[in-house]
Image (tube, helix red, strand yellow):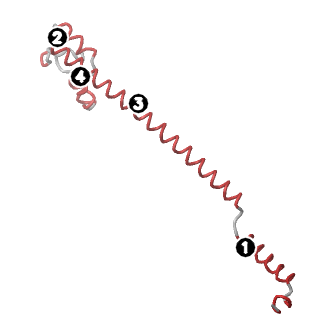
């Protein structure tokens, strides 16, 4: 009891205030931390939107590629089932893209194009 009576409470209060002030100065400003966290969250949100948009674009391209492949397969199947005439076959050969040409070198394509007439295969109308 005497300790409580003899203690200078003003100095104790000032000492506690000084300690709390030191602790408060050592801690980062919470508003600054909140702003940084909000900025990071916004950046993550924007990045996620970008990833989703890119994913949607890739899905769209994949769907288009599948659609084109199905169309090609259907036309080839229809041609086999319908037994096209020679004229229709010739027109199809003329206006259909030949994938084998895309794999050949320039020299090979030119050599085929400029073959002598006697050596040409006239069953195919490509290159005429």
Name the residue beneath numbered marker 1.
23
Eye-nearest disc, 4 or 3:
3
In space, the residues marked 2 and 4 are separated at their CA atoms by: 14 Å
Residue closest to the eye, 96 or 18 = 18
From this view, report whether residue 16 is shown above or below residue 74. Answer: below
Mark 2, Cα crowd under 10 Å, few <14 / some 14-19 / many 20+, is few
Name the residue beneath numbered marker 2.
82
Name the residue beneath numbered marker 3.
60
In space, the residues marked 4 and 3 are separated at their CA atoms by: 20 Å
Q: Secondary structure at mark 3?
A: helix
Eye-nearest disc, 2 or 1:
1
Residue beneath the point at 51% across and 44% down: 48
**Mark 2 or mark 3, which is nearer the start of the sequence?**
3
The numbered dot on residue 73 is 4
Mark 3, Cα crowd under 10 Å, few <14 / some 14-19 / many 20+, is few
Eye-nearest disc, 3 or 1:
1
Residue closest to the eye, 10 or 82 = 10
Judge left or right: residue 107 versus residue 51: left
In space, the residues marked 3 and 1 are separated at their CA atoms by: 57 Å
| Residue 55 percent across, percent down from the top left | 44, 38
């Amino acid at each position: 009891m005497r300790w409580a009576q003899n203690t200078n409470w003003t100095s104790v209060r000032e000492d506690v205030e000084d300690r709390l002030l030191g602790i408060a100065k050592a801690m980062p400003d919470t508003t600054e931390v909140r702003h940084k966290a909000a900025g990071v969250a916004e950046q993550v949100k924007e990045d996620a939107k970008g990833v989703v948009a890119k994913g949607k674009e890739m899905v769209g391209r994949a769907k288009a590629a599948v659609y084109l492949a199905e169309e090609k397969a259907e036309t080839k199947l229809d041609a086999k089932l319908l037994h096209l005439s020679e004229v229709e076959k010739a027109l199809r050969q003329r206006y259909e893209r030949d994938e084998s040409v895309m794999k050949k070198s320039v020299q090979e394509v030119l050599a085929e194009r400029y073959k002598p007439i006697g050596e040409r295969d006239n069953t195919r109308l490509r290159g005429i």
